[in-house]
């Protein structure tokens, strides 16, 4: 692997299609509109945020062993997952956090989902920063996260309770000042149980980018998948900003502060049965379709850019709203 960049030839998602209907959205507080052809229903976890369930969206499919990213046990961190106080709460997990200013160190830190699971890459280019641009950058081909489908995912395995934060830009290929135009082309963060199966995927993501160009348009996407059934919620807003996913035991909170927002706000709250060790990192979707299946006949038009990905030890889910 080159110390500056990792470039993959064109790859298309294979053997990952399933006849799953799009799942219902979580309940909302910001009052966004319902996606085309769908009915909003209450999220069983009491989701907080704006709810819509568009006809199409990114997806996830099974399998997945843990990757080579260092575990918290190896770094000597406290691994309490029951929400009790930990002496390490609030401490930066320096062994995990990445400012993308040292590509060689980044390559040693992160794992690629497609490599771990023996699949073709779903991106044409991935770069762990450079001396000229210390940001991670991913240019996808096609496919994404929804139901039993899965997409590009670069992760570390993290134990216990933690907060993961990134500043993300999901822009149109060739123009960083413009959002993507194709349906469900987005980038952000994802946490996932490593022991999934085709019918047993469990994960949560928060993405920015284009959703339904004929509906909610550009904004924030939240999605929880329980046993490979995805529930999607959308908020029309921006395609760049600061996002977080926080995990304390089986509690998961998503918060955001987009570039046009003054403070951190809650996007969603979920309950999800998570293993003590989860895969946590950055993800991307290039769905290209308004249906419950991706259009794999052409590449997406999104480019995902991550200024940093930082991990912090927490012991209370409310820390997800603290600066």
Image: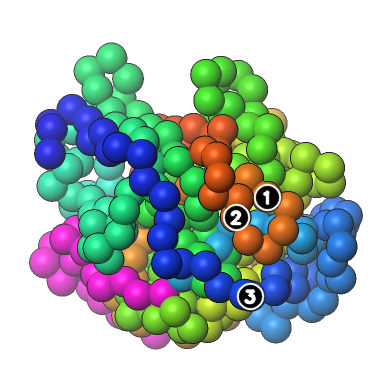
Q: Closer to the N terminus: mark 2 or mark 1?
A: 1
Q: Position of residue 93 (x, y in %)?
A: 26, 55
Task: Left or right? Give the position of 34 relative to 149.
Answer: right
- Asked if marks 2 and 1 touch (Cβ < 8 Å), the reply is yes
- Asked if marks 3 and 2 touch (Cβ < 8 Å), the reply is no
The residue sitting at 56% across, 73% down in the picture is 18
Q: Is residue 37 visible?
A: yes
Would you name the residue on which mark 2 appears? 294
Q: Nearer the viewer, residue 5 or 242?
A: 5
The residue sitting at 38% across, 54% down in the picture is 153
The kind of secondary structure element at disc 2 is: loop
Residue 228 vs 282, above or below: the answer is below
- CA gap, disc 3 to disc 2? 12 Å
Would you name the residue on which mark 1 appears? 289
Q: Nearer the viewer, residue 234 or 293?
A: 293
- Render colour scheme: rainbow
Q: What secondary structure predominates along the stretch shown in magenta?
A: loop
Q: Closer to the N terminus: mark 1 or mark 3?
A: 3
The boundaries of the magenta stretch are: 62-86
Q: Position of residue 138 (x, y in %)?
A: 39, 36
Q: Nearer the viewer, residue 31 or 302?
A: 302
Q: Which mark is residue 20?
A: 3
Task: Left or right? Give the position of 164 relative to 98.
Answer: right
- Asked if marks 1 and 3 touch (Cβ < 8 Å), the reply is no
User: Which residue is situated farthest in the top direction here?
Assistant: 132
């Amino acid at each position: 692997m080159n110390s500056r960049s990792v470039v993959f030839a064109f790859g298309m998602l294979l053997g990952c299609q399933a006849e799953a209907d799009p799942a219902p959205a979580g309940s909302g507080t910001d009052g966004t509109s319902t996606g085309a052809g769908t009915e909003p229903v209450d999220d069983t976890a009491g989701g907080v945020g704006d709810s819509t369930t568009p006809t199409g969206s990114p997806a996830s499919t099974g399998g997945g062993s843990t990757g080579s990213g260092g575990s918290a046990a190896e770094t000597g961190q406290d691994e309490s997952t029951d929400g009790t106080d930990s002496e390490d709460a609030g401490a930066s997990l320096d062994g995990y956090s990445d400012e993308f200013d040292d590509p060689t160190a980044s390559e040693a830190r992160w794992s690629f989902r497609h490599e771990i699971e023996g699949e073709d890459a779903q991106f044409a280019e991935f770069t762990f920063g450079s001396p000229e641009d210390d940001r991670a950058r991913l240019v996808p081909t096609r496919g994404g996260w929804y139901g039993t489908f899965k997409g590009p995912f670069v992760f570390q395995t993290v134990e216990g309770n933690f907060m993961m934060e990134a500043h993300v830009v999901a822009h149109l290929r060739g123009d960083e000042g413009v959002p993507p135009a194709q349906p469900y082309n987005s980038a952000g963060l994802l946490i996932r149980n490593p022991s999934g199966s085709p019918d047993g995927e469990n994960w949560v993501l928060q993405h920015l980018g284009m959703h339904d160009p004929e509906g909610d348009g550009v904004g924030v996407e939240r999605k929880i998948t329980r046993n490979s059934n995805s529930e999607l919620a959308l908020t029309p807003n921006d395609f760049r900003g600061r996002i977080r996913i926080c995990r304390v035991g089986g509690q998961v909170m998503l918060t955001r502060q987009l570039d046009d927002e003054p403070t951190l706000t809650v996007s969603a709250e979920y309950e999800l049965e998570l293993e003590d060790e989860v895969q946590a990192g950055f993800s991307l979707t290039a769905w290209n379709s308004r249906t419950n299946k991706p259009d794999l006949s052409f590449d997406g038009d999104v480019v995902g850019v991550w200024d940093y990905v930082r991990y912090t030890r927490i012991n209370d889910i409310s820390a997800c709203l603290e600066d």
